Amino acid sequence: MSEEMKCGIEIHQQLETGKLFCSCDSALCETGKGAYFRKLRPTTGETGEIDRAALVQFKRGMGFRYQRCDEASCLVELDEEPPHPVNESALETALTYACMLDADVIDEIQFMRKIVVDGSNTSGFQRTSLISTGGSVEVNGRKIGILSICLEEDAARKIETKGDEVTYRLDRLGIPLVEVATAPDMTTPEEVMEVALRLGTLLRATKKVKRGIGTIREDVNISIPGGARIEIKGVQELRMLPDFVRNEIGRQKMLLRIKDVLADRGTQEALFEPVDVTAVLKDCPSKVIKGALDDKGKVIAVRLRGFAGVMNGDDGTLRLGSEMAQYARTKGVKGIFHSDELPNYGIEQQHVDALREALRLPPDEAFVICAAAEKRANEALRTAVERANEALKGVPEETRDPQPDGTTRYSRPLPGAARMYPETDVPPEEITQERLERIRSNLPEFPEQTEARLTEKYGINRQQASQLVRQSHDELFSEISDAYGMAAVAATMLTNTYTELERDGSSPESVSDASVMELFSLLKQARFSKEAVPALLREMASGTGVEAAIKKLGLESVDSGEAAGIISKIVKEREEFVRSKGMDAAGPLMGPVMGALRGKLDGKQASDLLEAAIKKLISKE
Amino acid sequence: MSYSDSLSKALDAAGACEGARIEAESGGRTYRGVLMPHHEFSSPDVLIIKIGSGYNVGVRMWPESKITVLDRPHEAHKKEDAVPVADGLPSISLIGTGGTIASYVDYRTGAVHPALSASDMVNAVPEIRDVANVSAKVLFSIFSENMNVEHWQKLAEAVAEEMNNGADAVIVPHGTDTMGYTAAALSFMLEGLTGPVVLVGAQRSSDRPSSDASSNLLAAARFCTAGHRAGVFVVMHDSLGDDSFAVHAGTRVRKMHTSRRDAFHSVNAPPVAHIDSSGTIEPHVPEKPAHGKVIVKNAMERNTVLLQYYPGMSPGLFDDIITRSKGIVISGSGLGHVNENMVPLIRKACDNGSVVVITSQCLSGSTNLNVYNTGRDMLSAGAISVGDMLPETAYVKLMWALANTRDVEEAKNLMKRPIRSDTGDRRTVDV
């Protein structure tokens, strides 16, 4: 795969420094208040012309409602007050990161307004600034170029879409984001993940970033020779990056194969000639068609001469039909049916034959139909036909949405050059040489340095240290170890136990650092044994407090007298076996003993008590 | 801050001007892009360049740095669409004065332009053509903090001319800072209005997608075409949403917030009307338009001052000002009071033939100088109080009254009597 693909990534990381242009908390809220109605009007550009697409959307009456939050939004987020001066700590973090990547920091930072009219910014633009250009990051001995680092504000959170109204919550708007973009230097799906991991780890090394789901988002740009640049926007799970890359390469290759097939056939661009076939399908049992007709919709068909067998063919490896359907859905229809997948879905052979007859098509020629309100069905089909015609040229440039299964879906065309103009409300910020020198000589500890320190100081192995750093648990680990000793227990818990629990669908990351500290404080007091830690943590991950978890699981330690009693009872019950085996009975009996005492008693202690009990029984002989 | 001498010279020598594509080599790096205007707060040695990605970067230039011009500036040609005239729609004249509603950014250079052409303003709100035939002209291109008495006088003449030439209504886009003063001035200066005169502003400039300029303008047009109303009004947002607008009487309105869209409030009186997003208008005070010509009475007594009383106000410091003024409006504390040590100064002014008018810095509620000793002393000294009139309205009205009456007594009577709904006798719980 290595010589075939080109891939670059963009990482957006939220900072834990408070909001970028006001003094609000940068926290998300469970609920929002009010619903202020706004419209965003496309503005006239430098040529005096209004962006037509934006105007159409505006005229359609698209409106937005904004919910405020008591602590996490103020008049600034509501676009009712000018931005305050830039958050110095956020700027310092971005500058630090730029220095860590050895980038060229801009002499005087200028904030810009990047036009965004989807409502996610109350102002209609996103405030953003270029912090640096150039720089690099090294992964597995390869140098990957950095194109830019920007400091910008996050957008409002979409809560719901109802008809022509989208509701947003203002809590996320204005949270600082560091955006780092790499050159298209990555050549394997695994390398994409490694680079993302490294850039994320370096970001976390600043100790100023937010942690948890949704606080870091990746955009991936991929192309293969003969293909086109595709942007997969907003990947939240790092470990899925290779899947997205692999699937996208496969998709582009598939589209190139379709291009060849169509070229061999001499397929020409299909014309958009909609035919009303409602009458043909009026008695069709298909639920989709029935539903549309009940809503006074129509069934519209379009001929697609020369496209048979590529919409869904060659054992399902050619799938232009699903690409066409994704385009059609952006026009608000549930989907389309194409001739490669029919008869099916309640549309029977007789209907297919009747459709071909109505369309005056020979038996092997392709068509596509859509059932919806007439105007909408026409729009959807026009888009689907345009997408089919793109297949003649190969791979169209697109922005695609990641899906949970590692595939992607078409979302919109690649945006053109962003329209940006100066944010005159925020003064420019000169970055002096002295300031840069000061930052450079006080750079945070790099991950390698942290790993070395952890191994040396706490005696854990390098692999554990590396995992602690990668998963940003190094600070918590040091804190536990410094306060309670038990570095080995802490390391095992933060690495293995966390991974196991996550694999089982539990979320140990949701347990606060304070709760983890409390857990260790009680462990230190021998309230339970270290074997109980995984079970307790699992319980705590579901929202139970430490004390409550101990009670609920019955893991309260037993004192050694009580434990000795339980053990001697177990030994007594198996007296015959013990007498026959003598001291060798200890091994087999550890099972039932730990079964009764797991988590309540240290393993070594249990073993000692067991041996004593056996000895006592035998000596009675 | 402007460029340093050495950078200015270097730019001149390279022949680099704003909008030109240049290459700047400095400190071992090279940036290519369009030279942008220098920001007021930028360092004098920094060039601002818009690079390919659209971002502006500030590049620090040293004596050894190099500037090369790659391309001359491209002239942006603006298309001016002729506005079609539709039969049967009312005609509205738009008189531009400047302000946020009429300011925009040139996306190419980033320069902020103080005025949009009046036709640009109409074109930015194409829907306005569905409700009226709009003709537009620019009278001034200034921010409202620079608006002066002469501007009010010229504006009054321009409004009357439009109305007398057949406009059914006049809309005046205006900066918001002093829009309340201008609204009051036009209220007094224009007599026999045949239709509505509506001042409209914006708290967010029109270059932003979130600007309130267009929705306020459209609401103003809808109010204008609803018919059978005359007077001077201000139309602005009534809430933080783009779905509710208020029409305020020109003499009762005040900017009450520095930045919110709903900054304008009617004080001591309800708004004249509410307009919702669908254009439904709920009028509260229908005023009948007059017939015939609009008359302009725009003479103003310029020796008029507006003073705010404050604890520690020194009579000595204000002696000269008060003695030299023909009209003095004092925004007093509470019911309209000043420190008793100011009372001799008031007496001196009144004895001098000046008019001293008392209003309240509480804004809400009426003045009353009969309740406390100080108030009674102020009345005895010759001051008059003007009920619940806003201090700014009283200041404008006093200028006008002094210039349009024959003597001080007549001016005082005019001040105490509502002539443009500028003061009232009833205040209910709701306002």
Image: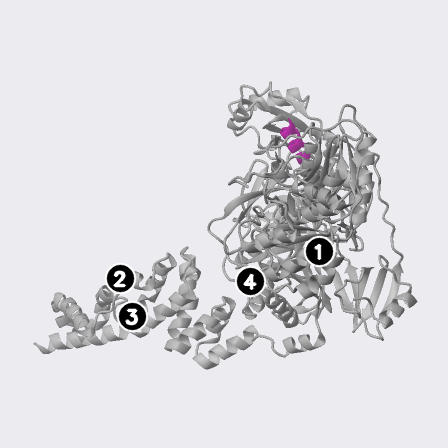
Q: Which residue is mark 4?
A: A18
Instruction: Say which amino acid is labelled 4.
Output: Gly
The chain letter under disc 3 is A
Q: Main secondary structure of the magenta part?
A: helix
Mark 4 to mark 1: distance in Å? 56 Å
Q: Mark 3 sits on what residue?
A: A529
SS class of the residue under badge 3? Answer: loop
Q: Could you tell me the amino acid type at mark 1?
A: Ala
Q: Is residue A382 magenta?
A: yes
How many neighbours does mark 4 have within 10 angstroms: few (below 14), some (14-19), or many (20 or more)? Answer: some
| Distance (Cα) linking label 3 and label 4 | 40 Å
Q: Is label 1 in a helix, a strand or a loop?
A: helix
The residue furthest bottom is A456
Circle 3: residue type: Ser
Label 2, on which residue?
A551
Residue situated in front as seen by the camera: A391 or B263: B263
Picture residue at 68% right of the left edge, 75% below the top: A436
Discs 3 and 2 lie in a common subunit: yes
Indicate which disc, 3 or 4, sits on the residue closer to the N terminus: 4
**Residue A415 appears in view:** no
Q: Which residues are magenta?
A: A375-384
- State how far apart marks 3 and 1 are (Cα): 91 Å
Percent of width and height locating residue B373:
55, 55
Q: CA distance from mark 3 to mark 2?
A: 14 Å
- Look at mark 1 in the image and give the residue it sits on: B349
